[in-house]
Structures are given as structure tokens and as C-alpha cells.
Amino acid sequence: MTEPMLTARDLHLSFGASPALAGASVDVLPGEVLALLGPSGSGKSTLLHCLAGILVPDRGEVRYRGSRLDSLSDELRSGLRRTDFGFVFQFGSLVPELSAVDNVALPLRLGGHRRRESEARALEWLERLEVADVAHKRAGEMSGGQGQRVAVARALVSGPRVIFADEPTGALDSLNGELVMDLLVGAAREQGSSIVLVTHEPRIAAYADREVVIRDGALAAAVVA
Amino acid sequence: MRTWGLGLRLALQANRVRLVVTALAVSFTVAFLLGALGALPARQAKLDRLNARDFVSVDTNASKGLKHPPRVTLETANGWYRGKPFTVRLVEAEPGAPRPPGLDRYPGPGEVMVSPDLRAAMQAHPKELASRVPGRVVDLLPDAALSGPHELFAYVGVAKVRYGQVVQHFGYHPRSQPTPVELKIAAWLGAVGLLVPVLVLVGTATRLSASSRDRRLSALRLVGATPRQARAIAATEGLVAGIAGVAGGLAFFWLLRRPACALLPFPDGVFAQDLMPTGLEWTVVVLGVPLLAVTTGVVSLRKVVTGPLGVRRQAPLKSVGWWRLVPVLVGLGMLVAMRLRADRWAPGHGIGTGLLLGGGGLTVIGLAVAAPAVSRLGGRLLSRMPGISPSLAAGRIESDPTASARVVTGMVLVLFVTAWLLAFLPVLQANRGSSDAALLQTLPKGLLTTGSAIEPVDLGAVRALPGVRAVVDLGRSTVAGPGRRDPDDAHSVTVASCTALGRALGRDLGCGTSKVHRIGLSDWRPGTRVDVLDADSRVTSRLALPAVIPTLGFPAQLLDGGFFDGDLLVDPSLLQADAGTTRLVIRTDGTAAAVERARAALPLSLAFTATTLQEQVATTGQVYLGYLRAVRIGLVLALLIGAASLAVTTADAVNERRRSLATLVAFGTPLRVLRRSVLLQMGAPMLTNVVAALAAAAVASACYLGTLQTQNGETWSLPWGSWALAALTAGVAVLLATAATLPLVSAIGRPEALRAE
Ligand SMILES: Nc1ncnc2c1ncn2[C@@H]1O[C@H](COP(=O)(O)OP(=O)(O)OP(=O)(O)O)[C@@H](O)[C@H]1O
Ligand SMILES: [Mg+2]
């Protein structure tokens, strides 16, 4: 059996009095597409944020490739997000003032790569995602579908091991949604990256190798597709 | 390092408005600071210039008959021309004699060198100055030879100087005179009054569209920017604004230096190159101000740098506690304590000064601290009002009173400082300027008085001049006798006809039929006889003082001015005046031309001593009136800047809420309701804060003025009228600022606004 890429054990996290996570545990295997399903407010996003090291759980542990993620410093977790993780959210994850190519080049530039090299790689990815024509438009000037494809390009540009996608198609029509999913999953499989996908659309969930359902902050059932 | 490059790009591409506004605010700060700091050195530079051309004279008796190095003999005449001080130096120079700065040679006999303004005056009115600046203009005096750009100054070459001094060397050792307290206070108040609103504007600007910046930074954090990188990126933006602002500020300073010099209260002006802060001050301003901008930028980001999920995942807003009212109350309490124990704790002594400065400072800071609580109070009051708009507005204020307070803090501080200054101005005014200013109003215009004539004067010729109404000569005599406490002392009396003098002065002096009048505090005893003495102190005749000596109805200020000899005015029919000691009172029609015509007709020595009362007063009064004018201009500027930052913040606050407003519109909330709620939401906290600021200022000034009253026994009334005006101005500014947001609200009402995120 392969070692899991990411593991979460018995995560608890509450905002104020109301618990968002109450004993959630999940494994993410290398190269798999894992879908987190569940009703609204059940804690899907919160779990994803904990897995990605954005939020630190109150209790429980998150391990990435065997070592604790939740006890790392903010600095180190930021570094991981830059190099090992990629993100596609429903909206708002692009920097509106920067052009598409600048947005995609961001993780590389923050990691200290040269500007020219970063932009060349960003352009390659934009071409692969068929949005090279908007490379020099600002994020605010693109359509929703174009924006999401740029976001996917940015999630992939640093060759991440895990891509976190929180309702990546939530703001798109079904045609565009499937296009974005095809590109995301295709590229991830090519790179061998895992995907943690939050969605409540069955058609999108169908891209997953495995689905878990979350209810009231904990896993309700695991279904292997 | 790469991060800085990225930050630079973001700074330039992201919010240009914020960048420009911040840079402008920083520019103002830098320019104001440099100007204010330059004012005191400018005064010193002026003194240095005067010292440099001043000279130490040779004791000619000691060196008589000896061989001596080349000499220059100078006779200086100080007078007035058309209301401005005017100096002529008569020069008799041997080749190679020492020269003052700026002169590479002396004018020979028949030649003159004049300052640019004097040359302009000579060209405009050749006849008026021909006798006082006799000769051919061979050169203009350069800046180095003058104390100010508008000085009227001339070197006149003559063959023989009659009453001159031989120069040993030019330049006293530059001594720095202590800066007068009034000047320091004026400079300090001016700097604070201007800096407070400008700093508020800087703070305001760096917070402009904060939420979109927060979103940008959290987006960066999401893709892996470390907290340090995010801070660096934010700091770069501040730095760019700071550097651009310093560059702009230096440009403003260089461009506006000359007009700014005109605001300084020196009658002969200030050379632009003299308005120059010291090297240390330059360094502090040029490095400190951008640093401040960067710091403000970073500090205002504290909360958001932490999270990649941005503001969404921030800790819930802390509610605003009433403890915020404590500092301002303590500050006011200190001032009240000072007032209550004014007999012991008056400013000027340790505790009093501490209470005044500490209490005043704490009140200013306290007002800013209290602003959220006071805004919340405004929200509470709103929630009592019926209707949906007030409750919408009240909910908003209650949910984040700090944000509503931020908008008004600048205005509140400006108002407080302004109101305090308005109360303080009359004190400043009364200490020096205003008694003179009041006197200026009552005195007849164009009334010339002269010093003692050395040469005989042709009074008839002066009387015949067009524009001359009356000429009275004041003689002088010396008396002594038993009519005074010390009978052996000789005393001067002025000899002139009371009625003629009254006519010349154009006022009723209360002459009556008496031929002897008291001037001021005379201790001559009525009904006694006094001896009249000649120049050698011999008794030439006797004078019987009347049984009643009426006092001359004369403005007290004139008596101080050395206008009369002694303390008695005696009619010429009773006394023979000394020959050659005549002084003149010349009444003209008040036009500058008539005054100068009269001066030009007098012998040279008298022409320079002939002074209008306005000119006499001007020397002291004008400088202080100048300070007052500078302070008033500062106040207007401060209010303008305050209103500007108010308008900017208000518009920005609405813009930031674009999304939630658009949502309300989308839900079908009538635009009218929305507009009203925005108006109330902006207006209510402003109103409560403005009222609080004015109330605090009223308490503070009442305490301060009350203390002065106890201390000096003077009565000061609170400037209710000016305060009402300030309140009105603030009210109008508040109204305009909120009204300015209405078009924005309407724009948001358009459906496409929802998309604009
Ligand atoms: N920043 C926060 N402050 C307070 N409560 C929060 C915060 N974020 C989430 N919650 C609460 O935590 C619970 C889980 O939220 P979460 O966003 O994880 O749900 P979700 O499953 O992603 O829902 P959805 O499908 O609607 O996105 C919810 O009850 C929510 O109200
Ligand atoms: Mg969610």
C-alpha cells in the first residue's frame, strides 16, 4: 500500500463557540483526485484549509509526507504553499491588478526565480490551458472561465504535489466548468499531483477517484469510486 | 530583493489613486515642514546680514595725525519712504578702505548705489527721492549687501561726510539673538496646526481602499508569500509613495519658497535662499517623513498580513469600550485643575506648564482615541430614530465604530486645534499688536512729526505745498523751580499753541482757555512759579503756573512715543522757545504723495526723521500683525486640508462598501433609502465628534483664558462668534463631504456595480 501524501487525524477546529471541524480524519494518496462532499456549512472548506496549512487546527494533527504540518511556522507553511501546493478557489484567488502572466508567475517570483524565466514558464502554462491570448490582460478584465483557467495555470506552474481546489467551477456554467476540470485533472495526472477537490456538483465529483462525505465537521462515509 | 521588485510593480499597477494621494500628502508634509523649520533660520540669516554690514568704528581722536590705513567714513540716516523703512549711508571712502559684503567698490562723490526696490521707487517717483538720494545711480546693490529683497537702501558717495564715523572693520561677530517667545509660539502653533491635518491626510491616504489591498495581499499569501514578503510588498508601496512624496515636497518647497517668504512678518522681505532649514533638519525631514509613510502603511496592515484567507477569516471585531473616553476626560481634568488652582499652578511654573501642555496634548490624543466611542454614541442616537434608513445606518456604525471614527478623526483634531487657536489669538494679539493696531485706526492719516531741526526750516515753503494742511512747530524750553518736588532739576517743556496743535492733529485736545497744559503724569504744582532757563542754565524769566492745569486729551500711546518734550505744554506767548530746537508737526491730506512731498521739502536731516504715526507704530505693530496673518492663513489651510481628507475618506468609505451597497440595491432596496442611510451613517458620527471636539475646545480654552485672567488680571472673553463660525464651517464641510458621496451611491445603484469586484 502506498504511503499517503497528506494525512489528517482527528481534527478539531471551532470559530468561537460553534465547531467547524469535530474529529475529521482523511488521507490523500499520491496522484489521486479526492473529492470532499457534504452539505453547506459542514466544514469542507475548513478541512481543506487545514490540510493546506492555511488554518491550524485546535486539536489533531496534519502530516505532509510524514512530517507535521500544523506545527510548522507560518514562514515554512508559506514556503510549502509556494512550492508543493497549488490553489484554485471559486473566485478571488487572482490578484486583480496583475496581468494573467504576472499572476501565474507569482509563486515562482515569490520563490526567488528570475522574472524572465518565471514569465516564460507562466506563458507555457497559459498556452497549455489555452488562455495565452489573455496573457497580458488584467485579472479583472477576463471572463470567469478565463480567470479560472488562469488560476489553474497558476496552481500548476510550480509543479505542486497537491492541488487544493475549493469549488473551482462554482462560478462557471457547466460547459466551462467541465473544460476547466478537464484541464486541471489532465495536467495534474500528467505531473502526478494529487487533487483535493471540494464540490457539491455530482458531475464535478465524477472526476474524483475517491469521494468522502463530511457532515457536521467529521467524515460521514468514504466511498471508493 | 526580488520581493521589492514585485512590490514596486504592484505599487505602480495597483491603486494609483492611493499612491498619488499619499505622495501628495507626503509632499505637503515635507514642504510645510521645510518651510516652517526654515522660518527661524531665515530670521537668523536676516540678523546675520545686518550684522555683516554693521561696523565697528575707529576712535578718530586717538589716531589723529598718525599714519593710518585707507579709511571709509559713513553717516547713516534711517527714515521712511511711503510707509517703508529707508536707509541711506553717506560714504566718503579712500581707495582700498574696508567694504561691507556685496560691495566691490564704493560710489564716488556724486554716485549712488541703490537696492532694486529703491531704484524702482526712484523711477516711479523721481521728485520725491531726488533730495534724499542725491547723485547718479551707478550700480544696483546685490543680495549680499541687503537684509531683505524689498529693503530700501542706498550708498551715496559724497566728498565730505559731516557727522560720520570711521569704519575700522565691517561685521560684528555673528551673535545669535534669542528668538522672541512670541515667534517661537507662533512657529510652534503654526507647525502643529498645519502638521496635524497633514499627518492625518497621510494616514488617511495610506488607508485608502484598504480592503482591496487586503484582498491583494491575502491572494499573495495564498500562493505562498511569507508574512515578511507581504510586509515588504506593502512597505514598498509606502516607500514609493514616500520617495515620490519627498521629491514632490522638495519641488513644492523650491517653487513655493518665494511666495512663502512673503508670509513671513518681515517688512523688507526674506530672501528665498535664506528660508533654509539646517542640515540636520533637512536630513530628518527627508529621511523621516518617508519612513513615517512606510511605517503607517505597514502598521495599518498588521491585521491582514497574517492570513492567506484575508479579512474573511479575521478575528471578529472587538467592540468599542467606553474606556476610550478616559484620556480626553483626564486631559480636560488637568486643564480644569490648572484653572481651579490658577493662583499656584499657572503656566510658566513647573506644575502649571506641565498641566497646560500635558492636559492639552492628552486632550488632542484623547479626542482621537475617543472618536470610535463618540461615533458609537452617534449610532445609538440614530437607532432611536424611526424608519429603516436610520436603523440601517445605526447597524453599520455599531458593527464597526472604529471605521466610522477613522473618517472624522482628522477633522476633529483640526477643529480642536483651530478652536483653541481662535481663543488664543486675541491674547497673542493683545500682547503686542492690537493696541497698536487699534491706535492706527484712530490716528489721523498722513500726520508727520519730525526730530529736532539742526538747520533752519522754511515753514512757509512747507505750508505752501499742495496736500499740506497745517504745520505747527513745537519749541522746547527748559524750566526749573519750586513748582516741582526737586527744585534744582531742569526740565524740558514743549512750547506750542494748544489750539494750533489741536487743529493740526484734527482732534479736540480739550485746550479751553488755559495756556498751560499737563501732558501725562506731570508733577508740577499748580499755582507756583517756575524759573525759565537759557542754554547755560541761567534764569532768564519766570513763569506763573495757573491755579488749575488742565490735562491734554491725548491718546496715551502718543505720549510714550517721545512726541513731546517734558510733561507740560506751554503756549508760546508765555515763553521764548530755544532757537534751533524746533520740531515739526505736519498735517497732510494723508496721501503718500503729499507725505513724501513734505519730506522732500525738509532739510535732509529732518527729512529722515519725519515719520508718520502709522510708521512709528508699524515698527512694533506690523511684525505682530504679520504673525497673526500667518497664523490665520495657517488656520484656513488646516481647515482646507481637513476638509480634503474628510472628503477623500468619505468617498473611499462608500467605495469600499460598494459591494454590500450593490447587494442591497439588487435586493430591491430603494436608492432613496440607501442614500439616506449613507448620509446618516456618515453624518451622525461626524456630528457627534464635531460637537465633542468643540465642547472640549470650549472647556480647554475657558480654562486657559481663565488662568491667564487670574495670573495677569486681564479679562479675556471666549470667542463664541469665531467658534460658531468654525462650527458652521465644519458643518458645511461635513455636509459637502457626505453630499459628495451621493453620486457614488447612485453609481453603485447601477446593476453592473455588482460585477465590478
Ligand atoms: N471565519 C469564520 N468565522 C466564524 N465561523 C466560520 C468561519 N469560517 C467558517 N465558519 C463556520 O464553520 C462552519 C464550516 O464552514 P465551512 O466554510 O468549512 O463550510 P463549507 O462546508 O465549506 O460550506 P459551503 O459548502 O457552504 O462552502 C460553518 O458553520 C461556518 O459558519
Ligand atoms: Mg466552502
Image: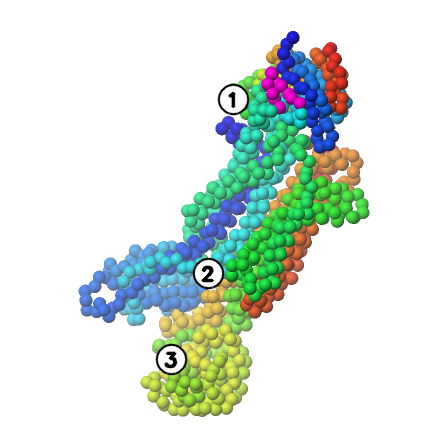
Q: Secondary structure at mark 2?
A: loop
Q: Which residue occupies the extreme right position in the image?
A: B386
Q: Are marks 1 and 2 on the same chain?
A: no
Callout 3: 10 Å neighbours few (<14), some, many (20+)?
some
Q: Is residue B379 at all visible to an observer of this figure?
A: yes
Q: Nearer the viewer, residue B93 or B47?
A: B47
- Per the picture, the main secondary structure of the magenta-coloured stretch is strand
The C terminus of chain A is located in which quarter?
top right
Which comes before the other along the chain, label 3 or label 2? 2
Which residue lies under the disc numbered 1? A113
**CA distance separating discs 3 and 1:** 95 Å
Which residue lies under the disc numbered 3? B581
Q: Residue at x 36, y 89 (%)?
A: B539
Query: Is A66 contained in the magenta span?
Result: yes
Q: Residue at x 48, y 45 (%)?
A: B285
Chain hosting mark 3: B
Residues shaded magenta: A60-70
User: Contact, CB < 8 Å: mark 3 with mark 2?
Assistant: no
Which is more foreground, mark 3 or mark 2? 2
B519 displayed left or right of A136:
left
**Callout 1, which amino acid?**
His
Query: Is A97 contained in the magenta span?
Result: no
Which mark, by number, is residue B180? 2
**CA distance separating discs 1 and 2:** 61 Å
Q: Is residue B562 above or below residue B239?
A: below
**Callout 2, which amino acid?**
Pro
Q: Is residue B372 above or below residue B707?
A: above
